[in-house]
Image (spheres, rainbow, N blue to C red):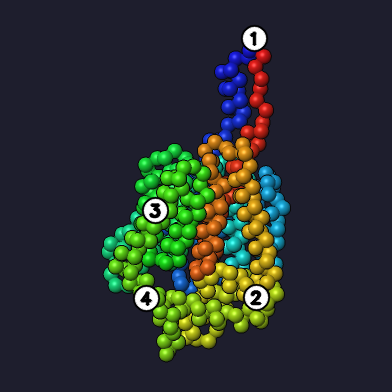
């Protein structure tokens, strides 16, 4: 005689109800979605010199809320305590170095608090007990990016002259990176989470919004992520080639667009005019990087502290002064020195190994997270590529989106492992 299956399944489903469907889980996801929507829709409202201000604006309030919520969840759930403590110590040390370099002020603390809020968001997702699954994280990214993408397309249709669309973001390059993440998230949802037509349409929307920003770095980032996603994705040759074909199509669209072709022609120059003004963004970057090398030589081991490359004041009229360097590797080299960069590379290696290990382990895929480790690897790769010529980690919306997805992959894959290894009750 066997135990009634229906009775056992009902009791089990009640005991193991996913956190995403519980009231605390719904409230947490709603809070994250609401704050991220506000953060994206107000990103372009900050003044250009906001990094030199010590005032607590809306983005600062959201950052503080994330830090407080993360501290509460970490004390209660205690998941990922050691990495969280190490990250907090790292931020504290190089914020203290910034205070030593520039003096104690709220302006000096801004970058440390901003980066702490990104870590805090990761802590929130990891301690959410499965409330923020990979499908939910990608849906949140689609939700918060929908309006900015439409605004970017509207700006392209109505702007004149040399203006580049930027949606609701502070800069076109910042918009491009976020749209790249949203496009890959939509592609993952389409291929591995239901093949819904809405996800395909959203992928096209975000890809087109990226193209009209005319960000060469953003386009290169999306192309790199699409090619990597296609090569790493399991399945038939057609499934693998699909993202690569899409990448080629985006490049073609960018080049045949009049403004895109004009931007390529303009960026082919690396000269600096007689007045010292750069003739292109590439020339500006090269000159800025050249000027930062002596800054690094002043403190090569431990750097000058977080945020010092964007807050230090120089001679009046200097077009390169206090501007982000558009290269995160050089920025962290100047701000944290060799020790800080090596520590960051070590942490990145641990993260990459964790994602690769989850991709290789058999029988660890939770429901609704098929191929999620590959998805996480592609997001990390995209951030590394974009950081070569952009302020990737200075753009909070892009950092929040990447952290939301990558940590959801790590958290949900771990939960999936435990669920798959749980013993099944035997019929008697």
Q: Nearer the viewer, residue 28 or 294?
A: 294
Which mark's residue is nearer the viewer, 1 or 4? 4
Task: Give the secondary structure at mark 3.
Answer: helix
Q: Residue at x 42, y 62 (%)?
A: 219
Find residue 330 and name its label: none
Residue 221, position as x, y percentages in the image: 47, 61
Q: Which mark is residue 266?
A: 4
Location of mark 1 (residue): 1
Does the CB distance between marks 3 and 4 fall below 8 Å? no
Query: Is 159 on the left-hand or right-hand side of 84?
Result: left
At numbered mark 1, what does the secondary structure look like: helix, strand or loop? loop
**Sequence-earlier tag: 1 or 2:** 1
> Is residue 417 placed above or below 104 in the rendered structure?
above
Q: Quadrant of the N terminus?
A: top right
Does residue 361 sit above or below 400 in this rendering? above
Mark toward the viewer: 1 or 2: 1
Query: Between disc 2 and disc 4, whose residue precedes?
Result: 4
Residue 246, numbered label = 3
Q: Nearer the viewer, mark 3 or mark 4?
A: 3
Nearest the eye: 170 or 186: 186
Instruction: Using the rendered image of the protein, determine whether residue 369 is visible from the camera's viewpoint.
Output: yes
The count of marks equals: 4
Q: Foreground mark, 2 or 4?
A: 4
**C-alpha separation, residue under disc 3 versus residue under disc 1:** 57 Å
Which mark sits nearer the N-terminus, 1 or 4?
A: 1
* Residue 213 image point, x, y percent: 38, 64
């Amino acid at each position: 005689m066997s135990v009634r299956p229906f009775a056992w399944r009902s009791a089990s489903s009640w005991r193991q109800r996913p956190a995403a469907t519980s009231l605390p889980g719904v409230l947490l996801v709603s809070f994250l979605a609401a704050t991220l929507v506000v953060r994206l829709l107000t990103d372009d409202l900050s003044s250009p010199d906001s990094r030199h201000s010590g005032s607590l604006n809306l983005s600062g309030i959201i950052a503080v809320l994330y830090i407080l919520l993360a501290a509460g969840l970490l004390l209660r759930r205690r998941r990922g305590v050691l990495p969280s403590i190490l990250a907090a110590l790292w931020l504290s040390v190089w914020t203290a170095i910034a205070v030593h370099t520039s003096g104690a002020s709220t302006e000096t603390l801004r970058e440390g608090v901003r980066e702490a809020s990104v870590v805090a968001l990761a802590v929130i997702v990891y301690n959410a007990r499965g409330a923020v699954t990979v499908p939910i994280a990608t849906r949140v990214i689609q939700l918060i990016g929908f309006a900015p993408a439409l605004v970017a397309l509207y700006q392209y249709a109505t702007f004149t002259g040399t203006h580049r669309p930027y949606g609701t973001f502070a800069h076109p390059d910042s918009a491009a990176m976020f749209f790249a993440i949203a496009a890959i998230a939509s592609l993952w949802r389409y291929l591995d989470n239901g093949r819904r037509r809405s996800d395909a349409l959203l992928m096209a929307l975000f890809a087109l919004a990226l193209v009209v920003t005319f960000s060469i770095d953003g386009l290169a980032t999306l192309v790199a992520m699409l090619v990597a996603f296609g090569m790493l994705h399991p399945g038939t040759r057609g499934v693998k080639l699909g993202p690569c074909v899409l990448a080629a199509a985006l490049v073609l669209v960018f080049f045949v667009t009049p403004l895109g072709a004009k931007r390529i022609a303009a960026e082919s120059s690396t000269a600096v005019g007689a007045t010292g003004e750069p003739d292109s963004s590439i020339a500006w970057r090269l000159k800025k990087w050249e000027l930062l090398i002596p800054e690094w030589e002043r403190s090569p081991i431990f750097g000058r502290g977080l945020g010092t490359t964007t807050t230090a004041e120089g001679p009046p009229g200097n077009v390169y002064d206090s501007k982000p360097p558009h290269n995160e590797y050089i920025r962290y080299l100047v701000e944290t020195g060799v020790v800080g960069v090596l520590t960051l590379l070590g942490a990145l290696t641990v993260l990459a190994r964790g994602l690769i290990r989850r991709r290789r382990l058999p029988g660890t895929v939770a429901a609704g997270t098929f191929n999620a480790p590959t998805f996480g690897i592609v997001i990390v790769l995209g951030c590394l590529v974009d950081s070569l010529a952009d302020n990737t980690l200075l753009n909070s919306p892009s950092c929040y989106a990447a952290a939301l997805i990558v940590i959801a992959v790590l958290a949900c894959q771990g939960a999936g492992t435990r669920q798959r290894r749980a013993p099944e009750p035997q019929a008697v």
